[in-house]
């Protein structure tokens, strides 16, 4: 076990064992863990601890990150068995002397903690994630399409999605069906179907009305439990089913 310096030198309060999954599909046959003993403060995030390891011990640890403030969705990973954002998860909140970080489930591994997002982006693009309008409706003087607060409330929660992939990682159906569109794309389909400015409801419902689409969801609810932005994909999927069955218009 490697001993590395603290994130805040001279101000350490507690120590933790950080276990990092190491795996390169190009030449490794299985995943292995490297352990590091770290000092941390109550505000130290898991991402900061990983970057501390990269700085002081092993710069080859592969991890994706960017904004460090739970906005870009880049640093999703499995932390102590649950999909989380590393920049949004404080070590002190885990209440454990051992923190284990692994790549997200249901995504191909690039190396170590970094995974490929092609499937997520492809399915997101498939549901046409933009407002669909008839150009004949737009006049030269029209600048915007106004909505009431009630109309905005119908979909605004789902507009908070940052495409971090945590919901897809938590979904048990994603693990068994490689063609399943996934909770992220389905929730975004509802985001646009519920938007009063959009005219693409029928085309989107046709896309998800598939054996690998909305009917493949078993409603485990795992997706909603892990979303860091408070989006409820499971609820959006149920609302979409209401449209499909004619209970909503």
Image (cartoon, helix red, strand yellow):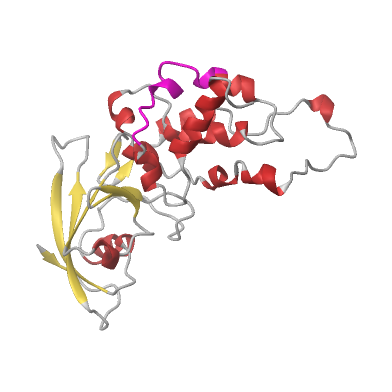
* Location of residue 201 with respect to 184 vertically, above or below: above
Give the residue furthest to the left. 1
Quadrant for residue 13, please give it: bottom left
Q: Please give the count of numbered marks on the rendered protein.
A: 0
Q: Quadrant of the N terminus?
A: bottom left
Q: Position of residue 186 (x, y in %)?
A: 48, 31
Give the residue furthest to the front. 247
Q: Residue at x 53, y 19 (%)?
A: 245
Give the residue furthest to the right. 141
**195 to the left or right of 27:** right
Is 131 in front, or is 108? 131
For the magenta stretch, what is the residue range? 206-220
* Location of residue 245 with respect to 141 vertically, above or below: above
Q: Residue at x 37, y 59 (%)?
A: 87
Q: Position of residue 140 (x, y in %)?
A: 89, 36
Q: Position of residue 108 (x, y in %)?
A: 30, 34
- Asked whether 128 falls inside the magenta stretch, the response is no
What is the magenta segment's predominant secondary structure?
A: loop
On the question of residue 124 being in view, the answer is no
Q: Residue at x 37, y 36 (%)?
A: 168
On the question of residue 67 being in view, the answer is yes
Is 48 in front, or is 156? 156
Q: Position of residue 231 (x, y in %)?
A: 48, 46
Is 114 in front, or is 150? 150
Q: Quadrant of the C terminus?
A: top right
Quadrant for residue 23, please give it: top left
Q: Residue at x 13, y 37 (%)?
A: 30
């Amino acid at each position: 076990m490697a001993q590395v310096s603290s994130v805040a030198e001279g101000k350490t309060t507690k120590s933790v064992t950080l276990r990092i999954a190491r795996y390169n599909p190009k030449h490794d046959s299985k995943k292995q863990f490297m352990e590091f003993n770290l000092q941390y403060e109550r505000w130290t995030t898991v991402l900061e601890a990983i970057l501390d390891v990269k700085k002081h011990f092993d710069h080859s640890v592969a991890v994706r990150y960017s904004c460090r403030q739970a906005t870009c969705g880049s640093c999703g990973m499995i932390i102590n068995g649950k999909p989380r954002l590393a920049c949004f998860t404080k070590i002190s909140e885990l209440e454990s002397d051992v923190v284990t970080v692994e790549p997200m489930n249901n995504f191909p591994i690039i190396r170590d903690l970094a995974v490929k997002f092609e499937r997520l982006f492809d399915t997101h693009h498939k549901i046409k994630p933009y407002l669909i309008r008839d150009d004949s409706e737009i006049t030269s003087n029209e600048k915007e399409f106004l909505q009431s607060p009630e109309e905005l409330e119908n979909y605004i929660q789902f507009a908070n999605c940052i495409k971090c992939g945590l919901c897809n990682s938590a979904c048990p159906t994603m693990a068994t069906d490689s063609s399943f569109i996934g909770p992220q794309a389905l929730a975004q389909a509802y985001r646009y179907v519920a938007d009063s400015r959009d005219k693409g409801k029928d085309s989107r419902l046709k896309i998800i009305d598939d054996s690998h689409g909305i009917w493949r969801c078993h409603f485990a609810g795992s997706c909603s439990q892990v979303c860091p932005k408070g989006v409820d994909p499971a609820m959006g999927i149920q609302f979409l089913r209401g449209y499909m069955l004619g209970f909503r218009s």
